[in-house]
Image (cartoon, rainbow, N blue to C red):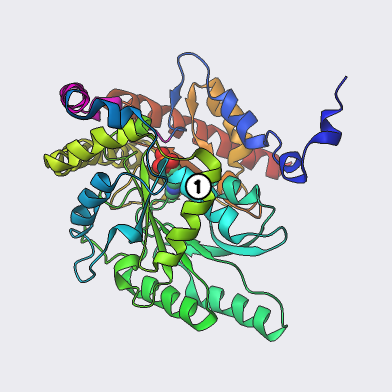
Amino acid sequence: MLDLEKLYSESAKIMKASVIRELLKLTRVPGIISFAGGLPAPETFPTEKIKEITSTVIDREGPLMMQYGPTEGSPGLKEELIKYIKNDVTDYDFKQENFLITTASQQALDLLGKAFINPGDTIVVGLPSYLGALQAFNAYRTRFIGIPVDNDGMVPEILEKNLGELKAAGKPLPKFIYTIPDFQNPAGITYTYERRKAILEIAYKYDIPVIEDSPYRELRYTGEKVESMLSMDKKGYVIAMFTFSKTMIPGFRLGWVVAKNPEIIQKLVIIKQGVDLCTPPFTQAIATEFLKRGYLETQVKANVAFYKQKQRAMLNCLDQYMPKLEGLSWTKPEGGMFLWLTLPKGMNADEMLYQAVEEKVAYVIGSAFFCNGEGKNTMRINFSYPTLENIDVGIKKLARVISEFAEKNKEKAAH
Ligand SMILES: Cc1ncc(COP(=O)(O)O)c(C=O)c1O
Protein backbone atom coordinates (compact mmCIF):
# COMPACT_ATOMS: atom_id res chain seq x y z
CA MET A 1 0.00 0.00 0.00
CA LEU A 2 1.24 3.48 -0.78
CA ASP A 3 2.41 5.42 2.24
CA LEU A 4 1.04 8.71 0.95
CA GLU A 5 1.98 10.71 4.02
CA LYS A 6 5.62 9.81 3.36
CA LEU A 7 5.34 10.69 -0.30
CA TYR A 8 3.54 14.00 -0.10
CA SER A 9 5.59 17.18 -0.36
CA GLU A 10 5.97 19.42 2.67
CA SER A 11 3.61 21.89 0.97
CA ALA A 12 0.96 19.26 0.37
CA LYS A 13 1.25 18.09 3.97
CA ILE A 14 0.37 21.50 5.37
CA MET A 15 -2.72 21.64 3.14
CA LYS A 16 -4.94 19.70 5.52
CA ALA A 17 -8.73 19.92 5.60
CA SER A 18 -9.16 22.89 7.90
CA VAL A 19 -11.57 23.29 10.76
CA ILE A 20 -13.11 26.05 8.70
CA ARG A 21 -13.91 23.76 5.82
CA GLU A 22 -15.42 21.28 8.25
CA LEU A 23 -17.54 24.06 9.72
CA LEU A 24 -18.61 25.14 6.24
CA LYS A 25 -19.77 21.59 5.54
CA LEU A 26 -22.11 21.96 8.49
CA THR A 27 -23.81 24.83 6.71
CA ARG A 28 -24.77 22.71 3.70
CA VAL A 29 -27.93 21.22 5.15
CA PRO A 30 -31.26 21.23 3.31
CA GLY A 31 -33.51 24.17 4.04
CA ILE A 32 -30.77 26.30 5.58
CA ILE A 33 -30.58 30.01 4.77
CA SER A 34 -26.92 30.51 4.10
CA PHE A 35 -25.17 33.84 4.38
CA ALA A 36 -21.94 31.85 4.33
CA GLY A 37 -21.19 31.73 0.60
CA GLY A 38 -19.70 34.49 -1.48
CA LEU A 39 -21.51 33.77 -4.70
CA PRO A 40 -22.87 36.30 -7.17
CA ALA A 41 -26.63 36.02 -7.71
CA PRO A 42 -27.45 33.81 -10.74
CA GLU A 43 -30.21 36.29 -11.69
CA THR A 44 -27.43 38.67 -12.74
CA PHE A 45 -25.89 36.30 -15.30
CA PRO A 46 -26.32 37.67 -18.84
CA THR A 47 -27.46 34.32 -20.26
CA GLU A 48 -29.23 35.49 -23.43
CA LYS A 49 -26.40 37.81 -24.43
CA ILE A 50 -23.83 35.07 -23.88
CA LYS A 51 -25.87 32.61 -25.97
CA GLU A 52 -26.01 35.00 -28.90
CA ILE A 53 -22.38 36.13 -28.63
CA THR A 54 -21.11 32.55 -28.37
CA SER A 55 -22.84 31.55 -31.58
CA THR A 56 -21.61 34.70 -33.36
CA VAL A 57 -17.96 34.31 -32.32
CA ILE A 58 -17.92 30.57 -33.08
CA ASP A 59 -19.14 31.33 -36.63
CA ARG A 60 -16.56 34.06 -36.97
CA GLU A 61 -13.47 32.66 -35.27
CA GLY A 62 -14.28 29.08 -34.19
CA PRO A 63 -10.93 27.40 -34.97
CA LEU A 64 -8.98 30.17 -33.24
CA MET A 65 -10.98 30.13 -30.01
CA MET A 66 -10.92 26.33 -29.87
CA GLN A 67 -7.13 26.22 -30.27
CA TYR A 68 -4.46 26.79 -27.60
CA GLY A 69 -3.74 30.47 -27.13
CA PRO A 70 -0.86 32.66 -25.94
CA THR A 71 0.03 32.33 -22.25
CA GLU A 72 -0.15 36.12 -21.88
CA GLY A 73 -3.80 36.06 -22.94
CA SER A 74 -5.61 36.98 -26.11
CA PRO A 75 -4.37 40.28 -27.60
CA GLY A 76 -7.99 41.13 -28.50
CA LEU A 77 -9.14 40.86 -24.88
CA LYS A 78 -6.15 42.86 -23.67
CA GLU A 79 -6.98 45.56 -26.21
CA GLU A 80 -10.47 45.84 -24.76
CA LEU A 81 -9.10 45.86 -21.20
CA ILE A 82 -6.69 48.66 -22.07
CA LYS A 83 -9.74 50.74 -23.05
CA TYR A 84 -11.76 49.55 -20.05
CA ILE A 85 -9.07 50.43 -17.51
CA LYS A 86 -9.19 54.04 -18.75
CA ASN A 87 -12.45 54.35 -16.75
CA ASP A 88 -10.29 53.95 -13.69
CA VAL A 89 -6.70 54.92 -14.43
CA THR A 90 -6.74 57.96 -16.67
CA ASP A 91 -3.18 59.22 -16.64
CA TYR A 92 -1.25 56.13 -17.69
CA ASP A 93 -0.77 54.68 -21.13
CA PHE A 94 -1.10 50.94 -20.53
CA LYS A 95 0.16 48.56 -23.20
CA GLN A 96 -0.35 44.85 -23.85
CA GLU A 97 2.86 44.11 -21.93
CA ASN A 98 1.28 45.48 -18.74
CA PHE A 99 -1.46 42.81 -18.73
CA LEU A 100 -1.64 39.10 -18.05
CA ILE A 101 -4.94 37.27 -18.50
CA THR A 102 -5.36 34.68 -15.73
CA THR A 103 -7.72 31.83 -14.97
CA ALA A 104 -9.52 34.26 -12.64
CA SER A 105 -7.94 36.03 -9.70
CA GLN A 106 -7.48 32.92 -7.61
CA GLN A 107 -4.86 31.84 -10.14
CA ALA A 108 -3.22 35.25 -9.96
CA LEU A 109 -2.84 34.77 -6.19
CA ASP A 110 -1.15 31.42 -6.76
CA LEU A 111 1.15 32.81 -9.45
CA LEU A 112 2.18 35.64 -7.15
CA GLY A 113 2.89 33.15 -4.38
CA LYS A 114 5.07 31.13 -6.74
CA ALA A 115 6.83 34.25 -7.98
CA PHE A 116 7.75 35.75 -4.62
CA ILE A 117 7.58 33.33 -1.69
CA ASN A 118 10.35 30.99 -0.54
CA PRO A 119 9.53 28.73 2.41
CA GLY A 120 9.81 30.82 5.57
CA ASP A 121 9.50 34.20 3.81
CA THR A 122 7.07 36.65 5.36
CA ILE A 123 4.26 38.56 3.66
CA VAL A 124 1.90 41.20 5.04
CA VAL A 125 -1.84 40.53 5.13
CA GLY A 126 -4.72 42.32 6.79
CA LEU A 127 -6.37 41.18 10.01
CA PRO A 128 -8.80 40.05 8.63
CA SER A 129 -8.04 39.09 5.02
CA TYR A 130 -9.53 37.00 2.18
CA LEU A 131 -9.35 33.34 3.19
CA GLY A 132 -8.62 32.14 -0.37
CA ALA A 133 -5.53 34.35 -0.47
CA LEU A 134 -4.31 33.04 2.88
CA GLN A 135 -4.72 29.49 1.53
CA ALA A 136 -2.99 30.28 -1.77
CA PHE A 137 0.01 31.90 -0.05
CA ASN A 138 0.15 29.30 2.71
CA ALA A 139 0.85 26.64 0.06
CA TYR A 140 4.25 28.30 -0.43
CA ARG A 141 4.96 27.94 3.31
CA THR A 142 4.95 31.62 4.00
CA ARG A 143 4.82 33.21 7.45
CA PHE A 144 2.14 35.86 7.77
CA ILE A 145 2.57 39.25 9.35
CA GLY A 146 -0.99 40.27 10.22
CA ILE A 147 -1.70 43.99 10.35
CA PRO A 148 -5.05 45.17 11.80
CA VAL A 149 -7.61 46.57 9.38
CA ASP A 150 -10.03 49.12 10.84
CA ASN A 151 -12.90 51.02 9.19
CA ASP A 152 -10.43 53.08 7.10
CA GLY A 153 -8.23 50.19 5.96
CA MET A 154 -4.95 48.61 7.01
CA VAL A 155 -3.42 50.63 9.85
CA PRO A 156 -0.22 52.19 8.44
CA GLU A 157 1.32 53.08 11.82
CA ILE A 158 1.31 49.42 12.88
CA LEU A 159 2.63 48.33 9.47
CA GLU A 160 5.46 50.87 9.68
CA LYS A 161 6.29 49.84 13.25
CA ASN A 162 6.53 46.16 12.25
CA LEU A 163 8.71 46.85 9.22
CA GLY A 164 10.90 49.27 11.17
CA GLU A 165 11.52 46.65 13.86
CA LEU A 166 12.38 43.99 11.29
CA LYS A 167 14.79 46.32 9.55
CA ALA A 168 16.42 47.43 12.79
CA ALA A 169 16.93 43.78 13.78
CA GLY A 170 18.54 43.08 10.39
CA LYS A 171 15.80 40.59 9.54
CA PRO A 172 14.45 40.04 6.00
CA LEU A 173 11.51 42.24 5.06
CA PRO A 174 8.19 40.84 3.80
CA LYS A 175 8.02 39.92 0.12
CA PHE A 176 4.80 41.86 -0.47
CA ILE A 177 1.88 43.63 1.16
CA TYR A 178 -1.46 42.05 0.21
CA THR A 179 -4.43 44.44 0.23
CA ILE A 180 -8.10 44.46 -0.84
CA PRO A 181 -8.73 48.21 -0.72
CA ASP A 182 -12.30 48.28 -2.11
CA PHE A 183 -15.15 46.68 -0.14
CA GLN A 184 -12.80 44.20 1.40
CA ASN A 185 -13.62 40.53 1.64
CA PRO A 186 -14.48 39.79 4.45
CA ALA A 187 -15.10 43.08 6.34
CA GLY A 188 -16.65 45.15 3.52
CA ILE A 189 -14.54 48.20 4.43
CA THR A 190 -12.89 50.53 1.90
CA TYR A 191 -9.45 52.05 2.38
CA THR A 192 -9.53 55.84 2.46
CA TYR A 193 -7.33 57.79 0.03
CA GLU A 194 -5.02 58.74 2.92
CA ARG A 195 -4.58 55.12 3.95
CA ARG A 196 -3.78 54.05 0.38
CA LYS A 197 -1.25 56.83 0.13
CA ALA A 198 0.32 56.01 3.49
CA ILE A 199 0.68 52.32 2.59
CA LEU A 200 2.24 53.18 -0.76
CA GLU A 201 4.71 55.52 0.95
CA ILE A 202 5.69 52.72 3.34
CA ALA A 203 6.07 50.32 0.40
CA TYR A 204 8.40 52.80 -1.34
CA LYS A 205 10.37 53.41 1.83
CA TYR A 206 10.99 49.70 2.50
CA ASP A 207 11.03 48.57 -1.16
CA ILE A 208 8.14 46.14 -0.96
CA PRO A 209 5.58 45.52 -3.73
CA VAL A 210 1.88 46.00 -2.99
CA ILE A 211 -0.77 43.62 -4.28
CA GLU A 212 -4.10 45.35 -4.89
CA ASP A 213 -6.74 42.62 -5.17
CA SER A 214 -9.79 44.30 -6.62
CA PRO A 215 -12.69 41.98 -7.45
CA TYR A 216 -15.41 44.26 -6.06
CA ARG A 217 -14.25 47.73 -7.13
CA GLU A 218 -17.03 48.28 -9.65
CA LEU A 219 -19.76 47.21 -7.23
CA ARG A 220 -20.20 50.55 -5.45
CA TYR A 221 -23.68 51.37 -4.07
CA THR A 222 -23.05 54.59 -2.13
CA GLY A 223 -20.31 57.17 -1.58
CA GLU A 224 -17.53 58.36 -3.86
CA LYS A 225 -15.02 56.24 -5.74
CA VAL A 226 -11.53 56.34 -4.19
CA GLU A 227 -8.53 56.38 -6.52
CA SER A 228 -7.07 52.90 -6.98
CA MET A 229 -3.58 52.19 -5.67
CA LEU A 230 -2.64 51.17 -9.21
CA SER A 231 -3.55 54.67 -10.36
CA MET A 232 -1.80 56.39 -7.43
CA ASP A 233 1.41 54.38 -7.86
CA LYS A 234 4.04 56.37 -9.73
CA LYS A 235 6.92 53.93 -9.20
CA GLY A 236 5.66 50.60 -10.48
CA TYR A 237 5.30 48.93 -7.06
CA VAL A 238 1.63 47.95 -7.38
CA ILE A 239 0.47 44.65 -8.85
CA ALA A 240 -3.29 44.93 -9.37
CA MET A 241 -5.64 42.00 -9.90
CA PHE A 242 -9.12 42.10 -11.39
CA THR A 243 -11.75 39.52 -12.34
CA PHE A 244 -14.97 39.10 -14.31
CA SER A 245 -16.29 36.85 -11.54
CA LYS A 246 -18.37 39.49 -9.77
CA THR A 247 -19.35 41.62 -12.75
CA MET A 248 -20.00 39.09 -15.52
CA ILE A 249 -19.75 35.33 -14.97
CA PRO A 250 -17.65 33.53 -12.32
CA GLY A 251 -17.86 30.32 -14.37
CA PHE A 252 -15.77 31.89 -17.12
CA ARG A 253 -12.80 31.84 -14.72
CA LEU A 254 -11.34 34.98 -16.25
CA GLY A 255 -9.24 37.59 -14.54
CA TRP A 256 -6.29 39.85 -15.28
CA VAL A 257 -3.19 41.18 -13.59
CA VAL A 258 -2.05 44.72 -14.36
CA ALA A 259 1.33 46.15 -13.42
CA LYS A 260 3.00 49.34 -14.59
CA ASN A 261 6.26 47.41 -14.37
CA PRO A 262 6.15 44.92 -17.31
CA GLU A 263 9.00 42.82 -15.85
CA ILE A 264 6.60 41.51 -13.21
CA ILE A 265 4.16 40.45 -15.94
CA GLN A 266 6.92 38.70 -17.91
CA LYS A 267 7.88 36.65 -14.86
CA LEU A 268 4.25 35.71 -14.18
CA VAL A 269 3.87 34.62 -17.83
CA ILE A 270 6.80 32.21 -17.52
CA ILE A 271 5.35 30.80 -14.30
CA LYS A 272 1.88 30.46 -15.83
CA GLN A 273 3.30 28.41 -18.72
CA GLY A 274 4.01 25.63 -16.26
CA VAL A 275 0.62 25.94 -14.57
CA ASP A 276 -1.96 25.79 -17.37
CA LEU A 277 -0.26 26.89 -20.63
CA CYS A 278 -3.03 29.41 -21.19
CA THR A 279 -6.38 30.58 -19.90
CA PRO A 280 -9.14 29.16 -22.17
CA PRO A 281 -9.21 31.15 -25.43
CA PHE A 282 -12.86 30.07 -25.76
CA THR A 283 -14.14 32.16 -22.86
CA GLN A 284 -11.69 34.95 -23.65
CA ALA A 285 -13.20 35.29 -27.15
CA ILE A 286 -16.72 35.56 -25.72
CA ALA A 287 -15.63 38.07 -23.08
CA THR A 288 -13.83 40.16 -25.73
CA GLU A 289 -17.01 40.49 -27.76
CA PHE A 290 -18.98 41.27 -24.58
CA LEU A 291 -16.63 44.17 -23.87
CA LYS A 292 -16.48 45.32 -27.50
CA ARG A 293 -20.23 45.75 -27.56
CA GLY A 294 -20.15 47.80 -24.35
CA TYR A 295 -22.19 45.14 -22.50
CA LEU A 296 -19.90 45.12 -19.46
CA GLU A 297 -20.77 48.71 -18.53
CA THR A 298 -24.51 47.88 -18.80
CA GLN A 299 -23.98 44.68 -16.81
CA VAL A 300 -22.11 46.48 -14.02
CA LYS A 301 -24.93 49.05 -13.76
CA ALA A 302 -27.53 46.27 -13.52
CA ASN A 303 -25.50 44.38 -10.89
CA VAL A 304 -25.04 47.54 -8.83
CA ALA A 305 -28.79 48.24 -8.84
CA PHE A 306 -29.58 44.63 -7.94
CA TYR A 307 -27.06 44.26 -5.10
CA LYS A 308 -27.68 47.73 -3.71
CA GLN A 309 -31.27 46.73 -3.03
CA LYS A 310 -30.17 43.53 -1.28
CA GLN A 311 -27.58 45.31 0.81
CA ARG A 312 -30.09 47.92 1.91
CA ALA A 313 -32.56 45.17 2.79
CA MET A 314 -29.98 43.36 4.90
CA LEU A 315 -28.95 46.54 6.72
CA ASN A 316 -32.62 47.37 7.41
CA CYS A 317 -33.25 43.86 8.75
CA LEU A 318 -30.20 44.11 11.02
CA ASP A 319 -31.45 47.45 12.39
CA GLN A 320 -34.91 46.04 12.88
CA TYR A 321 -34.22 42.59 14.32
CA MET A 322 -30.86 42.57 16.10
CA PRO A 323 -30.98 42.68 19.90
CA LYS A 324 -29.62 45.79 21.58
CA LEU A 325 -26.45 44.33 23.04
CA GLU A 326 -23.42 46.33 24.07
CA GLY A 327 -20.60 45.58 21.64
CA LEU A 328 -22.83 44.16 18.90
CA SER A 329 -22.13 46.03 15.67
CA TRP A 330 -21.83 45.57 11.94
CA THR A 331 -20.13 47.38 9.07
CA LYS A 332 -22.13 49.44 6.57
CA PRO A 333 -20.05 48.92 3.42
CA GLU A 334 -20.36 51.22 0.42
CA GLY A 335 -20.25 48.25 -1.96
CA GLY A 336 -19.18 44.64 -2.45
CA MET A 337 -20.97 41.55 -1.26
CA PHE A 338 -20.36 41.24 2.48
CA LEU A 339 -21.14 42.70 5.88
CA TRP A 340 -19.00 42.03 8.90
CA LEU A 341 -20.66 41.52 12.23
CA THR A 342 -18.91 41.85 15.58
CA LEU A 343 -20.44 40.18 18.61
CA PRO A 344 -19.99 41.46 22.16
CA LYS A 345 -16.56 40.57 23.60
CA GLY A 346 -16.42 37.06 25.00
CA MET A 347 -19.06 35.69 22.62
CA ASN A 348 -17.62 33.00 20.36
CA ALA A 349 -19.02 32.93 16.80
CA ASP A 350 -17.34 29.54 16.15
CA GLU A 351 -19.31 27.95 18.99
CA MET A 352 -22.48 29.81 18.10
CA LEU A 353 -22.43 28.38 14.57
CA TYR A 354 -23.70 25.00 15.81
CA GLN A 355 -26.74 26.69 17.30
CA ALA A 356 -27.23 28.80 14.17
CA VAL A 357 -27.17 25.70 11.96
CA GLU A 358 -29.79 24.08 14.20
CA GLU A 359 -31.93 27.16 13.61
CA LYS A 360 -31.20 26.79 9.87
CA VAL A 361 -29.16 29.92 9.31
CA ALA A 362 -25.44 30.03 8.45
CA TYR A 363 -22.53 32.47 8.30
CA VAL A 364 -18.75 32.19 7.97
CA ILE A 365 -16.87 32.39 11.24
CA GLY A 366 -14.74 35.53 11.28
CA SER A 367 -11.70 33.77 12.75
CA ALA A 368 -11.27 31.96 9.40
CA PHE A 369 -10.05 35.27 7.95
CA PHE A 370 -7.44 35.95 10.63
CA CYS A 371 -3.99 34.47 9.97
CA ASN A 372 -3.38 34.52 13.75
CA GLY A 373 -6.63 32.87 14.86
CA GLU A 374 -8.09 36.08 16.35
CA GLY A 375 -11.57 37.40 15.59
CA LYS A 376 -13.51 34.73 17.49
CA ASN A 377 -16.35 37.19 18.09
CA THR A 378 -16.79 38.09 14.42
CA MET A 379 -18.60 36.73 11.37
CA ARG A 380 -19.02 37.44 7.67
CA ILE A 381 -22.46 37.56 6.15
CA ASN A 382 -23.14 37.66 2.41
CA PHE A 383 -26.02 39.60 0.89
CA SER A 384 -25.47 39.09 -2.87
CA TYR A 385 -26.77 35.52 -3.14
CA PRO A 386 -29.80 35.13 -0.81
CA THR A 387 -33.21 36.33 -2.00
CA LEU A 388 -34.82 39.35 -0.35
CA GLU A 389 -37.24 37.03 1.41
CA ASN A 390 -34.42 34.84 2.74
CA ILE A 391 -32.53 37.93 3.90
CA ASP A 392 -35.53 38.88 6.01
CA VAL A 393 -36.19 35.39 7.42
CA GLY A 394 -32.47 34.63 7.85
CA ILE A 395 -31.57 37.82 9.71
CA LYS A 396 -34.57 37.31 11.99
CA LYS A 397 -33.27 33.81 12.78
CA LEU A 398 -29.71 35.07 13.26
CA ALA A 399 -30.95 37.78 15.63
CA ARG A 400 -32.74 35.12 17.69
CA VAL A 401 -29.63 32.92 17.77
CA ILE A 402 -27.49 35.85 18.94
CA SER A 403 -30.01 36.81 21.65
CA GLU A 404 -30.23 33.28 22.98
CA PHE A 405 -26.49 32.72 22.82
CA ALA A 406 -25.83 36.00 24.65
CA GLU A 407 -28.30 34.93 27.31
CA LYS A 408 -26.58 31.54 27.70
CA ASN A 409 -23.19 33.27 27.89
CA LYS A 410 -24.50 35.50 30.68
CA GLU A 411 -25.74 32.49 32.61
CA LYS A 412 -22.42 30.71 32.14
CA ALA A 413 -20.57 33.77 33.40
CA ALA A 414 -22.84 33.98 36.46
CA HIS A 415 -22.05 30.38 37.53
C1 LIG B 1 -10.64 39.28 -2.46
C2 LIG B 1 -10.82 38.16 -3.43
N1 LIG B 1 -9.81 37.83 -4.23
C3 LIG B 1 -9.92 36.84 -5.13
C4 LIG B 1 -11.09 36.11 -5.26
C5 LIG B 1 -11.14 34.99 -6.27
O1 LIG B 1 -12.04 35.28 -7.29
P1 LIG B 1 -11.97 34.65 -8.73
O2 LIG B 1 -10.94 33.56 -8.72
O3 LIG B 1 -13.34 34.10 -8.99
O4 LIG B 1 -11.63 35.75 -9.66
C6 LIG B 1 -12.18 36.42 -4.43
C7 LIG B 1 -13.41 35.64 -4.52
O5 LIG B 1 -14.34 35.73 -3.75
C8 LIG B 1 -12.04 37.47 -3.50
O6 LIG B 1 -13.03 37.84 -2.68
Q: Residue at x 58, y 61 (%)?
A: 116
Q: Position of residue 397 (x, y in %)?
A: 43, 27
42 inside magenta stretch: yes
Q: 307 or 76: nearer the eye?
A: 76
222 inside magenta stretch: no
Quadrant of the rendered image containing residue 127:
bottom right
Q: Decide: few, some or many residues near mark 1? Use Cα within 10 Å; few <14, some 14-19, many ≥20.
A: many
At numbered mark 1, what does the secondary structure look like: helix, strand or loop? Answer: helix
Q: Residue at x 77, y 45 (%)?
A: 10
Q: 323 or 381: nearer the eye?
A: 381
Q: Position of residue 183 (x, y in %)?
A: 35, 53
Q: Quadrant of ligand 1?
A: top left
Q: Position of residue 239 (x, y in %)?
A: 42, 62
The residue where tag 1 is placed is 272
Q: Residue furthest bottom?
A: 168
Q: Residue furthest top?
A: 30
User: Quadrant of the image for the N terminus?
Assistant: top right
Asked if residue 389 lies left or right of residue 259, the reply is left
User: Quadrant of the image for the C terminus?
Assistant: top right
- Look at the image and give the residue range highlighted in magenta: 38-58
Q: Is residue 155 visible?
A: yes
Asked if residue 6 lies left or right of residue 207, the reply is right
Q: Residue at x 18, y 23 (%)?
A: 59
Considering the whole magenta stretch, tell me its main secondary structure: helix
Q: 412 or 173: nearer the eye?
A: 173
Q: Position of residue 54 (x, y in %)?
A: 21, 25
Asked if residue 354 lies left or right of residue 86, the reply is right
As drawn, 190 above or below 220: below
